[in-house]
Image (cartoon, rainbow, N blue to C red):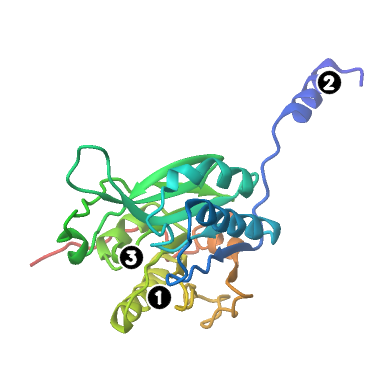
Amino acid sequence: MKNPIFAALFVLLLSAPARAAIPETLTVRAVSWEPSLKSATDKDWSARVLAEVSAAAKAGADAVVFPEGFSDGRDVPGVLDAAKAAAGEDRLVVLGYAPHRNPGEDFAYGRAYILSAGAWQIMDKLDPTPAERAAKVPLKPGVRLPLFRFRGGTVSVLSASSLAKPEIAASLKKRGVQLVLVAAPAEDEEGAARLSRSAAARAVELGAAVVTAPPSPAAPALHLPAQKGFGLKPPPPSGRDFRLPWKKLLDLRVVPEGSDEPRPFLESTHYQVEI
């Protein structure tokens, strides 16, 4: 290669980091965690958490979601380093909401730990239930709604109570979220119905996949947008693994090159609100 300009360009191409291709599908594992099966010791509980993360990683799951209440009152931060190692590279892990109380405070938070881009982040439950607010040690609402970049898209983690809030949905739509992971609690029949209906509504509104991960015996669920190319009835999960049509979800907000085709999930405000 005698031309020095072409030689320089060739070196730059070789040294430039390759852009990761968007996968056609994404697999989300909703961890089964029977609330009545209490771990006898902290060591037993930690081993159970790590076994679930390791099994999901070995099966090739891209994201792993634990339900709310999985902590059994144990110290979740104590298992974070080992869970990160068990997850391996480039995997999203959600350790669902568990009570967290700082020394000297007369209140607690419902705290989730999210492994994203190789680092743990915390998210405190935005909308504690009335019972949680009125508890002897009340839960204080969180004030941050973090979003996570993953496999070319944007992911949100919510509690079941936050999923039911239209104002949360409006915020997520503005930011183009394509996947909502819900670390859900064990609920009665009415609570389970609210969760299912809210998840279906959010999927339609956002053009996103919504995966709800409640404890056993409640079944996890996947809700997809009701759009052309998406089945109104998502394919049944393999165990508790859901295969999401990831590229199709991302393409809902991409206008084809040279086209003025309208896209329903691009932010657009064309009306005036009156009362």
Q: Nearer the viewer, mark 3 or mark 1?
A: 3
User: Quick one: 208 or 190, which is closer to the camera?
Assistant: 190
**Nearer-N-terminus badge (1/2):** 2
Mark 2, secondary structure of its residue: helix
Closer to the observer: label 1 or label 2? 1
Looking at the image, the residue that sits furthest to the right is 1
Looking at the rendered structure, the kind of residue marked 1 is Ala
* Neighbours of disc 1 within 10 Å: few (<14), some (14-19), many (20+): many
Q: Quadrant of residue 35?
A: bottom left
Query: Residue 57: x and y, percent?
Result: 66, 55
- Left or right: residue 56 versus residue 174 is right
Task: Report the residue at 47% width, 71% height from top.
Answer: 34
Q: Secondary structure at mark 1?
A: helix
Mark before the other along the chain sequence, 3 or 1: 3
Task: Please say whether residue 94 is visible from this viewpoint.
Answer: yes
Relative to the observer, which residue lies in front, 99 or 252?
Answer: 99
* In the rendered image, the vertical position of residue 204 relative to residue 9, given as above or below: below
Q: Secondary structure at mark 3?
A: helix
Across and down, in percent, residue 227 comes to 50, 75
Q: Position of residue 42 (x, y in %)?
A: 48, 52
Residue that mark 1 sits on: 200
Q: Amino acid at mark 3?
A: Leu
> Foreground residue, 139 or 127?
139
* Label 3: few (<14), some (14–19) or many (≥20) C-alpha neighbours in 10 Å: many
Residue 258 visible in image: no
The C terminus, quarter of image: bottom left
Residue at point 68%, 49% (across, down): 21
Marks 2 and 3, the one that precedes in the sequence: 2
Q: What label sits on residue 7 in the rendered view? A: 2
Residue at the spot of label 3 = 163
